[in-house]
Amino acid sequence: MDPDFVASVLDQIDPHTTLFNVISKSGTTAEAMSNYLIARGIIESYGLDPKKHIIFTTDPKNGILRKIAQEEGIETLEIPPEVGGRFSVLTPVGLLSALAGGIDIIDLLNGAKAMFEKVSNKNIYENPAALNALLHFLYYKKGYNISVMMPYSNKLLLLADWYRQLWAESLGKKYNINGEVVNVGQTPVKALGATDQHSQVQLYNEGPDDKIITFIKLEKFERDIKIPKIHEEYSALSYLGGKTLSELLNTELFGTEYALTEHGKPNMKVIFPEINAFNVGQFFFVYEFQTAIMGKLLEINAYDQPGVELGKKVTYALMGREGYEEFSKEVKEKVEKKEKFIL
């Protein structure tokens, strides 16, 4: 929603050759729909046919986008009704974008299928999702309420962003399945190796015992760079000459891993032999399954998100959405009175 960011994207595209993929199950998400209206306004200002420049990814039967699509003949992709947004990366929500980005979505789904077989194993020691969920649960019970994901690969950093939403929105809940107030949830944090060795690892090593850390290691980089042998007369530099950047990066990962272990800090590692669609598909599925298991262990509903609804309602009310007039008055009165409504 950042206008500078949206404007910078619009500056770079040619509406004549652009297809806008509007993704919203309900068709009421303010962020997605405001950008849809902006894109549609641009399309119409050029006299272009919206049917040739817009596709809706939405609910198969319900919602405003479905209604518009039926009235105007706009092509659609269907979001499975039973799949929530944060679990939807392997549905059309993520697949069209992946395809547009040159990703082999068949391999992506095959990776997920391969992982499904692994996580169906009832032997917990051979089931990566169950074992990882149990480790996080046991440490959470001991006060480790922060889960750090730290890829040592810039290309894999966005997986940590994806994990943050999955873990936080699924597991941060006020009530358990019995309606009891429990206020559970493990806070996900992302870090980047080796950059954050210099900004966060001091805290991880010597700070409070409240973090469980997952490293992501990439064994084979798509490209590599050999460090030249220059200034060999200086021992502080000469040891680097002839080595590769991938060798240095993964050695730094090992150093961080070793230091954390020496300090008694729990850590684990996910290894990517290489970055490809199959391996990423495996990653997506194992963490979705792990989240579901963690929800069971915490005895909460991992598939709803009631904690974000109030903020949405306030936005609707203050932006003038029909049906929220009384709530808008209520919010404004509380703000004017400076009432504290957080207990």
Image: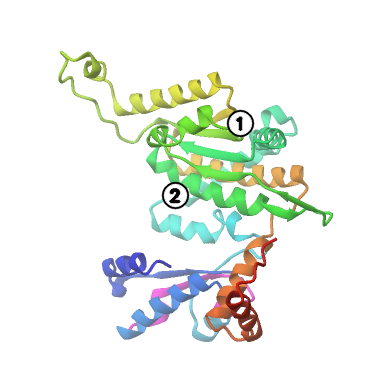
What span is colored magenta in the figure? Answer: 48-66
SS at badge 1: loop
Residue 54 lies in the magenta-colored region: yes
- Nearest-to-viewer mark from 1 and 2: 1
Front residue (pair 299, 86): 299
Q: Quick check: 242 left or right of 301?
A: left
Q: Quick check: 187 left or right of 249?
A: right
Q: Residue furthest front?
A: 337
Residue 245 at x, y percent in the picture: 30, 28
Residue type pointed to by label 2:
Asp
Residue 238 lies in the magenta-colored region: no
In the drawing, what numbered circle is on residue 209? 1
Residue at 49% x, 57% y: name it.
95
Which quadrant: the C terminus? bottom right
Residue matched to label 2 = 104
Residue 84 at x, y percent in the picture: 63, 60
Residue 111 at x, y percent in the picture: 54, 42
* Total numbered circles: 2
SS at badge 2: loop
Q: Quadrant of residue 214?
A: top right
Above or below: residue 180 compared with residue 14: above
Per the model, the C-alpha gap separating discs 1 and 2 is: 41 Å
Q: Residues within 10 Å of mark 2 (few under 14, many from 20)?
A: some
Q: Earlier in the sequence, mark 1 or mark 2?
A: 2
Above or below: residue 53 compared with residue 244: below
Front residue (pair 189, 42): 189
Residue at 34% x, 36% y: name it.
222
Q: Residues within 10 Å of mark 1 (few under 14, many from 20)?
A: some
Residue at 61% x, 41% y: name it.
286
Residue 321 is at least partly visible in this image: yes
Which quadrant: the N terminus? bottom left
